[in-house]
Image: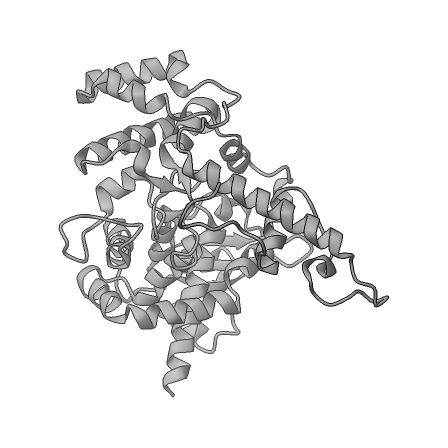
Amino acid sequence: MKTRNNPPCRFLPAALLTTLLSSAGLWLPSTALGQAPNASGKTVPKTVKKHATKVAANTLRAHRVKTANRTTPAPTPQTPPFSELPVVGEFIQEMQERHGFDANELMQYFSTVYSNAVVLKAIRPAAVPEQQRSWQRYRAHFLNERRIDGGLDFWRMHEATLARAEAVYGVPPEIIVAIIGVETEYGRNMGNFSVLEALSTLAFEYPPRAPFFRSELEALLLMARENGALPTDYRGSYAGAIGIPQFMPSSLRRFAVDFDGDGRIELRHSTADAIGSVASYLNRHGWQSNAPVALPARVDGDPAPLIAAGTKPAQALGELARQGVTLLETDPRAAEKQADLAEWPVALIDLVTPDWPTEYWIGFDNFYVITRYNRSSFYAMSVFQLAEALRQAREAARE
């Protein structure tokens, strides 16, 4: 297609040519792009260069036509839209009766979303036996140089906002930064799934957790109406979590805050709102200022009954000591802490790695609060240890 402002493309940069050829399913050696000859000293004939450039130009031209022509129909999905499923019709009727939604309007929204196979694959448990869960592998994913350096940069950039969040909600900056670091690597990986499509897929096609995701779908519709937005506008993770801190719609409605004072809550684009909302969430779930999170432990005897009791602190540290659980003696203040914290309620946490000795930790109320963000002990310990690494790195930099 020729236009006055777009002369025909005769020659293309090598990088662009390579990209276009790859997208067309073709491959050429670097010499075909007018680059250095190969090891034999031979170059590709000019006819090959000319043909390659012509193919690339045609590919580029076709791409421009496809991009410009917005009436080009999209590929037909292999499954019907959710609006055609009877269970969705029942859900829409519930929303109409309980919340006064317009049924036709909701039907229109659901006619634009389809079952997403990627979402279903991502949500299903890995085909790995439970005993193969690995704390060391999980930990290495979040406690590494990149995540620590990124956290220090994030803390430095938003120091005033983090300090204000601590003053308002009592949650230390390192914990807030660590949660955001584990969730989205400081906003870099927020997900780009349609939240409406992801939640619909999980609500209507994933029976193990259908009630939970159905309630989150309901929360999404309510949130969109409250904010004057369209349900189809929200983007997030495969599980429907939104923004820098990855809040589910129900949590966003209950715990998110407008921390930048612009009159609206925006967790995808406002770092201040994300910081304030994480602090608000932890505060509302019982975060205790200046209280411990977790301490390494030694176990003598069978820990199974204590592990089975879960992560919610239910017994005093002194009582666990009588059952063979004490603070790890490598801590120079272990005996002192054992005495000072004897009456504090705690839980025993096990961090299992196949073929490695199991790590045991004493979890306090603040550890349990982190598990309200994500119920995994691996997750909560990664947040805590990343927070400690960030705090120690900042202190070392000041010395």
Left or right placement of residue 95 versus residue 73 in this view? left
Say if 140 sits above or below 243 in the image.
below
Instruction: Tell me where residue 309 appears, x and y as whole percent.
Output: 45, 44
Estimate the x, y position of residue 143 in percent, counting from the top left: 51, 64
Residue at the farthest front position: 4
Image height of 246 relative to 39, above or below: above
Instruction: Name the residue located 47 percent from the left edge and 51 percent from the top edge.
Output: 7
| Residue at the image point whose x is 28% and y is 50% from the top | 267
Where residue 31 sits in the image (x, y, percent)?
A: 73, 61
Depth check: give the residue in front, 325 or 147. Answer: 147
In the image, is 168 to the left or to the right of 362?
A: left
Name the image colouring.
Answer: one colour
Q: Looking at the image, which is closer to me, 6 or 381?
A: 6
Image coords of residue 216 (percent x, y): 33, 32
> Is residue 172 shown to the viewer in this render?
yes
Q: Residue at x 31, y 50 (%)?
A: 268
Q: Is residue 22 visible?
A: no
In the rendered image, which quarter is residue 149 located in?
A: bottom left
Which residue is situated farthest in the top direction here?
86
In terms of depth relative to the viewer, which is nearer, 119 or 314? 119
Identity of the residue furthest to the right in this view: 40
The front one of 127 and 202 is 202
- At horizontal 32% and vertical 13% (from top left) the residue drawn is 90
Q: Quadrant of residue 213?
A: top left
Count the marks.
Answer: 0
Q: Where's the C terminus, which quadrant?
A: bottom left
